[in-house]
Amino acid sequence: MMALSQARTRRLVAIHGWSGAILGLLLYVVLLTGAVAVFAFEIGSWSAGGVKSHQPFARPLDGTLRALVEQVPAEYRDDVSVFSNSAGHVVAFLHTHALNAAGDPDERGVLFELHPETHAVLARREGFGSEVFGADPWGALDEFLVELHVNLHLPDPWGLYATGVLGLLMLASAISGILIHRHVIKDLFVAPRLSSLLLNARDRHNLAGSWGLPFAFVLAFTGAFLSFAIALGLPTMGKVAFGGDQMAFLERLIGVREADDPTPAPLANIDAMLAGAAEVSGSAPRGFSVHHWGQADATVTVFHLPAEGDLTAEQQVFEGTSGAYLGPKPALGTKPSMGSAAFGLIPPLHFGTFSGLLSRVVWFALGLAMCYVTLTGLQLWLQRRAEERLWHRLARAVPIMGYGLPIAMAGSGIGFFLSLPAERTLFWTPAGFLIAAALAIAAGLVIPGDRTRARAYQAVLGGALLALPLLRMALGGPDWGSLLAGGNPAVVAFDVTLLVFGAAFAFAAAGLRRPGPEAAGVPDRVAAE
């Protein structure tokens, strides 16, 4: 590693420690929710009943869309976006560009929710996109968890600012961690010492941190980029380069063709274009959009997941009136460029979608490892300041947050399932989270002693995780036999994963030997104070 003087090493150690201590618990929230959010699609399918939804356009859709277009005002035919939601239903949003009540760019139109087999209209909602999409009771759980990761459920744009700052904080910790590790390669294979609880905790922290440093750097950089680009960079560029016309800027950014021929003209067969896109890409479409429906300059863009061996998702563009294939479209603009290629790598590297299920499993495991590094780093930092009352209080908050957050997330799932029959999930999903969080905090303040508190937390978390798949099936969700027969093993795998984790925490609660803070060198009297 780089040779550093003792003074520089001390400064880097201080940066590394303080960057984690100041906002470490919030960073833990973003890390844990991010690890879970990599399976957002699977969580949506699992929570909504396990409907097979990976081929939402298997049945012909052209006639249905033409009938829906005739039911909306002409202004809403400017753009038509079609995709599948968490329940596997086909969603068609016919809309135009507008500014919402807050003066922010938004889409206004009519959303139709269709049955995937019969295309019968299950729901119709009209309004701004931020309103009609937020009213879907089937997607309440995965949407809640994703928003908790993206913006901590803070008002726009402050949530993105907060997660951007946390990304920079994590980046500072990762860089300083790399510089102060004098033997990174050696630390990758170090065996934790058993002669001392404190040394054992430090060795395990260094071991997990060493393996997670490259991941932490990538995650921090891409997360900070996405947060600040959306909240600050793109609006600023729109104001500077386009005189405040945000919609014109966004159209130029994503590469929408200019409306050079508004002459009325019929759209070519959509099903034929979807079949052509599937043949070119080698995968089923995940969604598509029609720009300027019914005009001579109409275009159809079909979206796919990354092809085998590719890192970025594909977009195939067709001429609307003739159905002719125009070629692939880059993530930004209309022509391939280094900027577009670099931007296209940011989301898959952040969310781990670049290699299908395998990369997301690895991202999930590394995310959990970084959660462990964050919490143990805080505990080790607090151990050195055990005599200072301010740090005593933070020491009490570490196990409360460490166990309380997953308990609250499980509580949101319990609230979702209990309210799903009445379709009240939009209220009870966040309410379940808050109720479980309040109970976890109260338990952390009332239960004395770290050993007893940790045992109680693990018992509750284990029980909540075990209850989730049972609630899903008891309240009308399909059982494993029907899921496997219907070709949807992902929901079964998700149930099994929850049962395994739940059993592990229940077993730990029954046979717990060492409390968490004490294992990291924090005296039990500090944690219980």
Image (tube, rainbow, N blue to C red):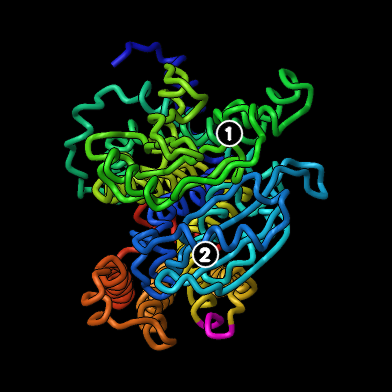
Measured from the top left, where is residue 289 in percent x and y?
Answer: 52, 46
Measured from the top left, where is residue 159 in percent x and y?
Answer: 65, 45
Q: Reply yes or no: does residue 312 show up in magenta.
A: no
Q: CA distance from mark 1 to mark 2?
A: 69 Å
Q: Nearer the viewer, residue 392 or 286?
A: 286
Front: mark 1 or 2:
1
Q: Which residue: 30% across, 83% down?
A: 479
Does 306 appear above or below 249? Answer: below
Name the image quarter holding residue 66: bottom right
Check disc 2 and give the amino acid type. Ala
Helix, strand or loop at label 2? It is: helix
Measured from the top left, where is residue 521 in percent x and y?
Answer: 38, 50
Q: Nearer the viewer, residue 109 or 481?
A: 109
Residue hosting label 1: 297
The span picked out in magenta is 418-422
Does 455 appear above or below 219? Answer: below
Helix, strand or loop at label 1? It is: loop
Q: Is residue 303 visible?
A: yes
What crowding class fits label 1: few (fewer than 14 Cα within 10 Å), some (14-19), or many (20 or more)? many
Q: Reply yes or no: does residue 420 show up in magenta.
A: yes
Magenta: predominant secondary structure element?
Answer: loop
Q: Which residue: 59% across, 67% down?
A: 136
Residue 528, disc? 2
Check disc 1 and give the amino acid type. Asp
Q: Nearer the viewer, residue 316 or 69?
A: 69
On screen, residue 33 versus residue 295, left or right, reads left
Q: Is residue 513 visible?
A: no
Name the image quarter holding residue 518: bottom left
